Amino acid sequence: MAAFTRRGAVAVALGALLLTGCASAATDSGGVKPTTDVANPYQAERKAQMQPVLDQWAQALRDGDEEALRALTDPAAAPDFIQRQMRAAGGISKLDFTRWDFTIGDDPEVFVPQGIADRVGGLDVAAPPVYLNFQLAGVDEKPVSTPVGVIMARRGDTWTLVSDNETADSTHATWPAGPWVFGPTESLKVPSGTSGDAGLVLFHPGSESAAGLVAAMLPDAVTAISDFWGTDWDRSVVVEIAASDEEFSALTGNEMGRTDVAAASISLRKDGEQDGHGQRIVFSPSAFDRLDELQRTIVLRHELTHLAVRRDTGRGAPAWLVEGMPDYVAYRGLGVPLRDAVPQVAAMVAANGPPDSLPEDIAFAGTMADLAYQLGRTVSDFVVATMGEDKLKELHRALAIGGLAEGPLDAAVMQVTGMNMNQFTTAWSQWLGAQFGA
């Protein structure tokens, strides 16, 4: 399943800027991939033979049973297969899952490259559509399913495991579905207080300080977002702290080595689904070294807002809204003057006057991302200042569904604000000029 990533910037007080990768859709969620009997008896028989091996694999990972893992592994397996399985088992064993198993879905099998098939040999080499189904106790309302790029080989009547990553590409995603794949993983449960919701922070040994900071911030952050958006969203938040650039990139889809990305919100669901469950916030390994308390608060609130509104957000929604509103919410109530929150906009308007068009989506991922995010933020401020917060929420629900052509978009803006897009843009531009003009 192809993944998509939106990266962008969160502006903080006093002109300091930090970047967040704001919405990386990862794998599949919302329950277990449905399975049905395939019509081909041969395929049904193969599936029936493979499933017990997958069951044993899941149990061996839960138990950290190296002997069992070796017994399931093919002699021609990838050289680091056992090492990586044991590393994952070390992460899984300390976490509380109410469900952890592998199933074979109805998707077509993935083509096994000829070079791998030749290396393995055997009577049959296959890459069935395997899914890991897992549910973290106390925080995942329902199971999450994520694809695992398994290659299996048959020798005689026995199927064995060859690899879990050699078929991964831009079309065929594979786990990791969590930090446990990268080694021993600790969890810190965040007290639920009176809301009935619990949070969970997942981290590796050595990141205890960062985990403590997140746990301390999370309750107030959830309360702040609920105060704006309401409580009809999954507030049992899971925050993961990556220990390396490799882990952060693997979990979020962000480009390796991007030290300017502080955090990302990800949704473990299929593209196109708007289910609000199976969501995570992932912090980069360097975030806690370079962000102060206010900046961490802003980043966390920004990403939490994405989680809160995910169910109402689809592909093709205008970035100036779906990224700008989380910035507005992130700063809400913190006492940061608008001029300090959007310093690039203030400087641009004072020097050259306000822009006459809203920032295009492409600008939020380019070299001008900082400015684009700040401009998007000011659109939300404009709506609140002139029409109130309820109108901002109404506008988000009307436009963030995504996929609106120019005509329907114009009509939706008119219905909410009483202005067409041209009038809305002009009014925003004039408001900017009044705020920051020389």
Image (cartoon, helix red, strand yellow):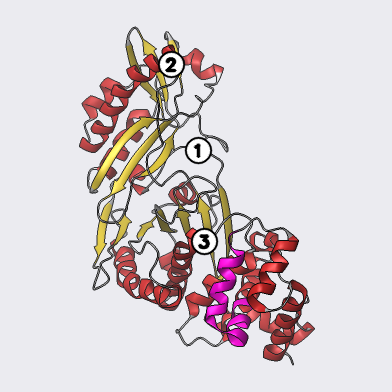
Quarter of the image for residue 207 reads: bottom left
- Could you say which disc has been placed on residue 60 in the image? none
In the rendered image, which residue does mark 2 sit on? 43
273 part of magenta stretch: no
Task: Tell me if 65 is positioned left or right of 54 in this view.
Answer: left
User: Contact, CB < 8 Å: mark 3 with mark 1?
Assistant: no
Identity of the amino acid at label 1?
Answer: Ala
In the rendered image, which residue does mark 3 sit on? 312
Q: Residues within 10 Å of mark 2 (few under 14, many from 20)?
A: few
In the rendered image, which residue does mark 1 sit on? 173
Which stretch appears magenta?
A: 379-401
Identity of the amino acid at label 3?
Answer: Asp
Q: Residue at x 24, y 31 (%)?
A: 60
- The answer to whether residue 75 shows anywhere in this view is yes
Please name whichever residue, 99 or 396, is drawn nearer the observer in this view of the structure.
396
Position of the C terminus by quadrant: bottom right
- Name the front one of labels 3 and 1: 3
Q: Main SS of the magenta segment?
A: helix
